[in-house]
Amino acid sequence: MIEEAKTKKPQWAMVIDLDRCTGCEACVVACRVENNIPTVGPEEAAKGRSINWIRIERYFEGEYPDVKVKFMPVLCQHCEEAPCEPVCPVYATYHTEEGLNAQVYNRCIGTRYCANNCPYTVRFFNFFDPKWDAPLDKALNPEVSVRSRGVMEKCTFCIQRIRKGEEKAKDEGREVRDGDVVPACVQTCPTRAMYFGNIGDSESEVSKLSKSNRASRLLEELGTKPRVIYLNKGD
Amino acid sequence: MLEKPPTNSKINSDLLRPVNKPGRGWYATVTVSGLVVLAAVVALSYQFARGLGVWGINRPVFWALDITNFVFWIGISHAGTLISAILRVTGAEWRRPVTRCAEAITVFALMIGALFPIIHLGRPWFFYWMVPYPNERGLWPNFRSPLAWDFFAIGTYLLGSIIYLYLPLIPDLALLRDKSRGRWQRLYRTLSLGWRGTQLQWDRLERAVRVMAVIIIPVAVSVHTIVSWDFAMTIRPMWHSTMFGPYFVAGAIFSGIAALILAMAVIRRVFHLEDYLRPVHFNNLGLLLLTMSMIWFYFTFGEYLTAWYGNEPGEMAVFRSKVSGVYSPFFWATICCCFVIPVVLLSFKRLRTIKGTTVASILVIVGMWFERFLIIVPTLAQPRFAFNWGSYKPTWVELTLTAGTFGYFVLLYSIFSRLFPIIAIWEYKEGLAIAPAQMEASDAGRAALATAD
Amino acid sequence: MAARIIAIFDTPLDALAASGKLREAGVPRSAITLMSSEPLHDEPFESEHKKSHIGALAIVGGFIGAACAVLLTVLTSRRVDLVTGGMPIVTPWAFGIVVFELTALGAILATLGMMIYEARLARRGASDEYDKAVSEGNVVLCVRCEDPSLQETAQAALGSNVRGSD
């Protein structure tokens, strides 16, 4: 895993502790509020077009009465070798120097090729122009652009908060510290199951947790090198 | 050979009849296909106004009928290349009445196929961002993307096949120039570039056509390979296959020959060209169709056997949905339409008649359309995380657009056969003159050779 | 302005005989043009065409296309300089596909251009040396005579087949 920072820039990563996740979906709600995600309405949702940059995947294991439920929050993994990036014909998605998979809304012409090549199915398309029923239209976050129809979108690790944290650190004349940047989902999680930080900094929480013997990544065998680490005791 | 060349007026009048006196059938065809195209234009305008939500696509089935039609029509466009170029290069003289039919199919099928990368976009008004040109944004297309490869491949093939259609058309354009009047004469005069028929011009023309035939064959192979790589370059189960290149090229040639047979059967009936498009042509093309059917089945069997035998969970989910699940009626219908029935119809000389090959061709065209659908939708509907599995149902917009493509093809082809002779007159006569036995001409054609006119 | 004599014959044999007579009378071969609605394959004039360069120029066109493609892909991807999927900025395998297509395109355009040039198409004055009889299946012979005395010889050699002259 290429975790040493090639530059001195922070390498953002996330850790999700599945043993703490209760599947409450507070992160899902926080994400939509923070990132101006439209609600598509019940008909569109029934067609499979609802947009959830982070979602809780729910799997049932076993037969009654030994049923277990597994909750897995899935969001954009910001893969170091993201399969969605090279297939975009217009460079609307690329890898930043801080390890983020960036989505450039203004450049996207909506071929949806990136969504087809994402093995985690974390990319979403605006089939219609987004709209918010009142009074949600007055609750939009001014720091996040609203996407038009025909454009792809996905989790950005709350890049607006990353920029804010980096600027604050720069103003104070120091490096970004653990805790400077907290995405909306991480901030909201009631069981504190999510962590976010610079995996290039060996003292950061995510860096230490990523070395835990409970740590694994999704679909590692595909070679995408995701930056989201899951902690799971496994039974 | 130094007797009078067979310019007799019968061949001229027969092959120019569609241009001069198209008949009621032609007007009916143009009207009906025009109406279908109009309906498609309405559907398309609605789509541009409202957004891609008016289609049935969703998450995770982000591509469906749009890309099915794209791959299907690019596949049909392989008719011209195989028949015209390969048969020209190998000196098979029976191809002469058939080459222009085939080359025209290629150009129009390509034009239709090339529309879909534009109309399937979320923001189609920015389609030109896929074109490499200097701009103030300092941005260029991403040449690593198979969609960028598509642009170059389809662009080259379209330009190449237009030129390949145009070059042998020049002498016939001169013929039309000499025989027509009024504003049509101006069109033919411009397009024929002052062709006079000097021996130098004939030599250069035939040389250029031969060079074009040699170039266009690898281009055609590369085009459908690159289209297949839109799928094969991804890491989706049952898409990420090394076999897709040859598989798609074989499928394209297969559907292309079927389209050619169907087009020939229709032209033969509508324009009364029974003396020129004879049972032997359908027999030979029918044998080619049979061969391609077996090759297609060979590739399909290989794809499915390796998926099933490997038993990889991601692939097995897609496999099961196609073979025994929700898509199985389409899958087994495809196997019947593309392999079982055509092989029966085409293997026996008694059944390999004009009617028999035409029926087989219609089945193949339908079957191959569904085959494209089956390659695209089941894989997309079953992504790796089962939580995200989905389904797909087309809306009236997509169905109208699909019908519109067929209407558009028929319309363009009808207009072409009205403006230009659909059988290359000079090539046909040249064949009668230099290799009459191989030409398989009718008795009437041979008699025309003998009479001085 | 060279005088042109146009003669119309029923068969290539007749036209060939006439051109033989013209050559005996001293008309240079380059001044005689035979036009037909089919290529006359056995016709001895065929071998007298200068060697064609269509094939060679197709190859040259291919090289030019390839060079353009390499420049386009390498220079622009370096200019944009964005990392995608961990692939290198200059990706030879992927760019090679664009190179292949533009090579073919270069060859195709060169073939078309060279053919139009060598066949002397799309030039003015073509209809001066032409007769519509070609489209009726006749073979038309055209002689360009600058020397008036040669004109008379040519007229005599061609006899009653002469259509008109200017």
Image (cartoon, coloured by chain):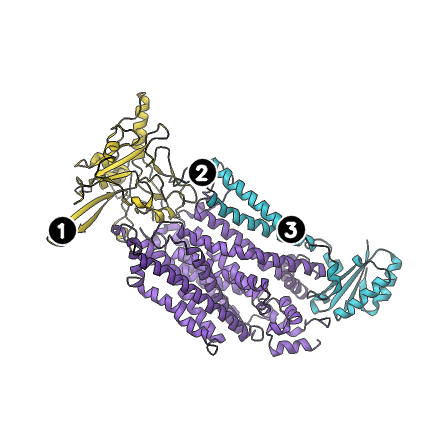
Chain colours: A yellow, B purple, C cyan
For label 3, the SS is helix
Of all chains, the one bearing label 2 is C
Q: Amino acid at mark 2?
A: Ile
The reply to the same-chain question for discs 1 and 2 is no
Counting from the top left corner in percent of width and height, residue B397 is at 37, 57
> Badge 3, how many Cα within 10 Å: few under 14, some, many 20+?
some
Residue C56 got which mark? 3
Left or right, A6 with reference to A35: right
Residue C89 got which mark? 2
Of all chains, the one bearing label 1 is A
Residue A67 got which mark? 1
Counting from the top left corner in percent of width and height, residue B337 is at 39, 68
The reply to the same-chain question for discs 1 and 3 is no
Residue B14 seen in the figure:
yes
Counting from the top left corner in percent of width and height, residue B154 is at 50, 53
Instruction: Please report contact status of discs 1 and 2: CB closer than 8 Å, yes or no.
Output: no
Counting from the top left corner in percent of width and height, residue B99 is at 57, 65
